Amino acid sequence: MGPFLKTALFTVVVPTSVAVLIPLVIAGDRAAEDGLARVFAFLLLAVGAVLYLRSAWDFASFGRGTPAITDAPRRLVTRGFYRYTRNPMYVAVLSAIAGWAILYAAPVLWAYGGVVFVFFSFFIRLYEEPRLTREFGDDYAAYMKRVGRWLPRGMG
């Protein structure tokens, strides 16, 4: 099975669950907001989808791997949205969760997003960054200096 099919399967199971299914279950039968809130929510959902799909594409096409930790890219991916943030897939998932929180005006979804952010932060700092440093050495160290963990340098 090639990296594109494995990435598609991973995407259906993990990010779709965290960024779509769980938020919709949490939202329950709440009514969706109208007007500007709805527009902004759908904008965040669309941004999340584009960020994730392009980043997953870069993992499969350039990195020759997947977002799954068991089949990580074999090459350091620094193209596409990875030029601006080291973690565009995580930013994508958080963007989608924020979109649902706005669409359903649900503080519990903001709390869920906060928990997901904390989990991502610990996972990145305790697992991903040390592994990438071991695997890609000076190239990853230079990349970390150039590109922010969450936001482009100069934005936070």
Image (tube, rainbow, N blue to C red):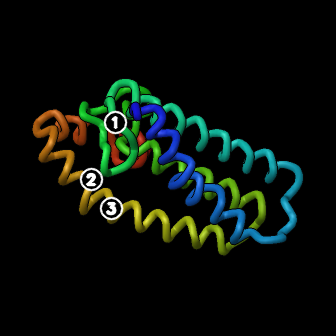
**Residue 22: where, in percent of width, then height?**
63, 65
Q: Amino acid at mark 2?
A: Glu
Q: Is residue 154 visible?
A: no
**Residue 143: where, in percent of width, then height?**
24, 36
Label 3: which secondary element: helix
**Residue 37: where, in percent of width, then height?**
79, 53
* Rendered residue at 62%/68% (across/down): 110
- Please name the residue that numbered disc 3 is placed on: 123
Q: Amino acid at mark 1?
A: Gly
Label 2: which secondary element: helix
- Please name the residue that numbered disc 2 is placed on: 128
**Residue 98: where, in percent of width, then height?**
63, 57
Badge 3 crowding class, 10 Å Cα cut-off, few under 14, some 14 to 19, many 20 or more, is few
Closest to the observer, 96 or 1: 1
- Please name the residue that numbered disc 1 is placed on: 65
Specify the quadrant that holds the N terminus.
top left
Real-space CA distance between mark 3 and mark 2, rounded to the nearest whole angstrom: 7 Å
Real-space CA distance between mark 1 and mark 3, rounded to the nearest whole angstrom: 19 Å
Pointers 3 and 2 in contact (C-beta within 8 Å): yes
